[in-house]
Image (cartoon, rainbow, N blue to C red):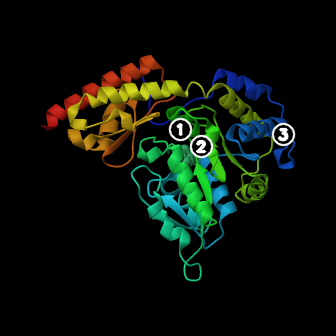
Amino acid sequence: MKVVDLRSDTVTKPTREMRQAMMDSVVGDDCHGEDSTVNELQDLAAQMMGKESALFVPSGTMSNNVAIMTHARHGDTAIVDAESHIYYYESAAISGLAGVMPIVVDHPTGCPDPEQITYYLQRNRNRFPKTSLLCLETTHNRRGGRPITLDRMKTVCQLAHQHQTSVHLDGARIFNAAEALGVSVKSITEHADSVSFCLSKGLSAPVGSILVGSNDFIQQAVQVRRRLGGGMRQSGVIAAAGLVALTKMVERLSEDHVHAQLIAKHLAEIEELELEPSHFPTNIVVFNSHKVGIAAPEFVEKAKKKGVKLSYFDTQQVRIVTNSDADQESIMHAIDILVRLINQTKNTSN
Ligand SMILES: *Cc1c(COP(=O)(O)O)cnc(C)c1O
């Protein structure tokens, strides 16, 4: 049976070119700053993101938490979206490790509007905790892979800065955001103090994320990474794959977006789903399986039996993520199976 894995863009395997680069990589002890491949990756990443410095970290989760711990102290607060990765998927590290209290705001775009956060930014620090940090996420995973518009990004970043609050951008899929908005990555990062992005998602590297910011910020972040056990030795072996990811895999992300639109358009033809393809401008499509009378985990199980692997956000929302390991033929095959399965389910539940 043909299997198409659309659970996530993390399921991608390193390309042949990555494996070759890993094999040939020149390495050294990165804790002594002697791994030239890591240094090359960090330099390239900083340059692409338009920041002074970059730090290679084992995961996006560690990257976010190194950033939080560098920007904020125990007992401070950070503004986060209710559906953000930082709040939802990081085993409560923001409070459990960083000792920072999340202030949770909820906005359908995943980016708070100025009215929602002004109060928290400006309230009196004699009586209220300090709001050290505003955390943003683009593209926003649990909001259907939505990018934050440049206007909104600028407005909320400037507002935070007016109140001496730093901005950390979780840009795990920042290249998808740039592609969907038709803008440069630098225009997205311009107003954020730190940015984290993943090499191990749509870009297909096996391991690793990058944190960027000012020289000062990264100097402190090195120490925090060490504290979290993220200091690595001959990590040029994995950084080599990261270099291929940044130089060879960014341009093809548009393919994943085309594939996601194909899926969304076919699902939109099933009226009961009430799905609007324009809500899914990147590589993630979400639909509510309850609308055709089936719980999300149950639908995911059925699809898996037919060879299409999906994931779910909760009991109603099924998530589909296109990625470099699923070509157009696989996508058409998956669409065929999903549409048939949904129609069957719909008819039996009526
Ligand atoms: C995947 C992801 C991360 C980091 O995940 P790791 O699995 O720790 O690398 C962070 N933020 C968002 C929005 C993500 O999707």
Q: Is residue 124 above or below residue 308?
A: below
Question: Which numbered disc covers residue 188?
Answer: 2
Of the residues under marks 2 and 1, which one precedes in the sequence? 1
> Is label 3 or label 2 in front?
2
Rounded to the nearest whole Å, what is the CA distance between mark 3 and mark 2?
A: 29 Å
Question: Which numbered disc covers residue 177?
Answer: 1
The quadrant of the picture occupied by the C terminus is top left
Rounded to the nearest whole Å, what is the CA distance between mark 1 and mark 3?
A: 31 Å
Image spot of residue 183 (x, y percent): 57, 35
* Residue ranking furthest to the left: 350
Image quadrant assignment for residue 198: top right
Three-letter residue code for mark 3? Asp
Three-letter residue code for mark 2? Ile
Question: Which numbered disc covers residue 35?
Answer: 3
Answer whether labels 2 and 1 touch (C-beta < 8 Å). Answer: yes
Image spot of residue 188 (x, y percent): 59, 43
